[in-house]
Image (spheres, rainbow, N blue to C red):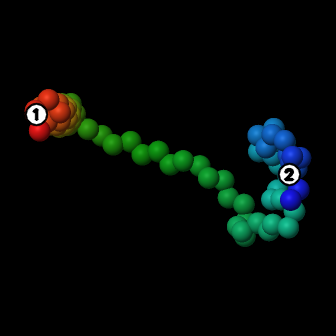
Amino acid sequence: MKKHTEHRHPNRRKHHERRGEELGPPNGWRERRLSVERRLPVVQENVVSEAEWFRRLARFITKKRAMEKAELEALAITATKDQSPH
């Protein structure tokens, strides 16, 4: 059995970066889009009153504290199970 010691590409990470150049798709590949369209993000601004902002912030903080409390309780339960004699 022949031992394979030589690789085609010794370090596959050291290759030519194609993204910096406009060469189109690789040879043998066709473009799937019929026409080129720029993909621009669409930004929409939501108007939120100061009162609504504080309500949302309070709701977020309440949920976060509840999650942290549940995590601490789960850790405490696990710790007491580990310390109890079997």
Few, some or many C-alpha atoms within 10 Å of disc 2 (few <14, some 14-19, many ≥20)? few
Q: Nearer the viewer, mark 1 or mark 2?
A: 1
Please provide percent x and percent y for residue 44.
42, 46
Q: Identify which residue is drawn at 38% across, 42% down.
A: 45
Side (left or right) of 48 relative to 24:
left
Q: State whether residue 18 appears in this view.
A: yes
Q: Which residue is mark 2?
A: 4
Q: Identify which residue is drawn at 76% across, 40% down.
A: 13
- The numbered mark, 1 or 2, whose residue comes first in the sequence reads 2
Q: Identify which residue is drawn at 62% across, 52% down.
A: 39
Q: Identify which residue is drawn at 86% across, 52% down.
A: 3
Q: Which residue is mark 1?
A: 85
Image quadrant occupied by the C terminus: top left
Query: Could you say whether the residue bearing mark 2 is in a helix, strand or loop?
Result: loop
Amino acid, disc 1 = Pro
Task: Using the rendered view, name the quadrant where residue 64 is placed.
Answer: top left
- Front-lying residue, 9 or 47: 9
